[in-house]
Amino acid sequence: MRRAIGQSLRIDVAAHAVAVRRVGRWGGAAPTQLAAQAIAPSGEHPFDAIANALRALLGELEVGGWPVSFTLADELTRLWRVTPPPGAARMADMEAAAGLRFQSLYGEPPSAWRISADWNATEPFFAAAVPHTLLAALQLVAQEFRLAIVGIAPRFVGAWNRNRRGIRQGAWFGVVHDNLLTLAAIDAEGEGVRAIRPLPIPHGADQYWLTQTLQREALLLDLAAPELLQVCGAAPADWTKPAGGAAYIPCAAIGGGAA
């Protein structure tokens, strides 16, 4: 397949499916899906199943030499807030704080995960973790098909980086994908993101469910409830219809709705 200037591949990876998309650097055009494949559940070797599905897709495409970025479904990753210890000055101090917080939140040692973050020795920062075995599987597939990896990131991180400048004062931000709402609770007083919460979306979740969920998360974080939720991704249509009264928190698409 011939590659025009500025074009690359984006491979979306989830536990149940993978998809290969062609994206362009300029023009703002939506990604073009080239191929997709469902994945049979595999409790013992889930990342091998992902790798094999990618091999099946890429084997049908002539993409050798293309640059590729992998977008990982949020349920395959971990995202959390880290408060650096008092007097932190070295990278090792921040890495240790991130590891301890990871173990406290998820009940497992961080040794099986690759942790990256916007490291900051003086202010709270957010960290992301991806399983080493998943990274190894993706890197092996890329090597087999002569793809040049330019990035591997959780879906939420990519969506946040693309849309953060468009988030209104008093709003929270969310990414909807595969019946999961990854929610960024934002402090209206200017302290930035206070927490990132992955929240399963139940069948039939409507404006009432969304409002109750946002109000509950605000109470748990000791924050004011948002005036608006801005979402990208396939949000339920009921969320973005005109709010059914002052008791409901309105919801609006951001960034064309694409996650």
Image (cartoon, grey):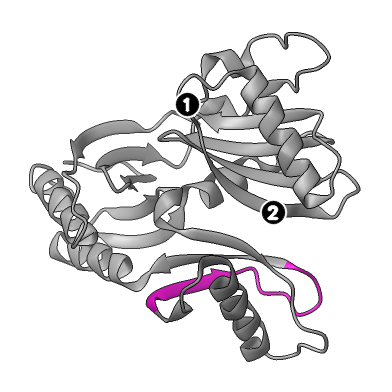
Is the residue marked by circle 2 packed among few (<14), some (14-19), or many (20+) residues within 10 Å? some
Seen at 13% across and 64% down, the residue is 144
- x, y percent for residue 132: 34, 73
Q: Are marks 2 and 1 in contact (CB under 8 Å)?
A: no
On the picture, is 14 further left or further right than 97?
left
Quickly name the residue at label 1.
Answer: 234
- x, y percent for residue 164: 68, 43
Q: Callout 1: helix, strand or loop?
A: loop
Q: Is residue 35 visible?
A: yes
- x, y percent for residue 32: 32, 30
The Cα atoms of the two marked residues, 2 and 1, are separated by 22 Å
Q: How many marks?
A: 2
| Label number found at residue 195 | 2
Q: Callout 2: helix, strand or loop?
A: strand
On the picture, is 58 further left or further right than 237?
left
Seen at 31% across and 55% down, the residue is 67
Q: Is residue 113 magenta?
A: yes
Q: Is residue 101 magenta?
A: no
Seen at 42% across and 81% down, the residue is 111
- x, y percent for residue 192: 79, 53
In the rendered image, the residue lying farthest to the right is 189
Q: Which residues are magenta?
A: 112-124
Residue 90, image quadrant: bottom right
Q: Is residue 167 visible?
A: no
Of 8 and 223, nearer the camera is: 223
On the picture, is 195 further left or further right than 160?
right
Q: Which amino acid type corresponds to the residue marked 2 in the rendered image? A: Ala
Q: Which amino acid type corresponds to the residue marked 1 in the rendered image? A: Ala
| Looking at the image, residue 79 lies above or below residue 163 | below
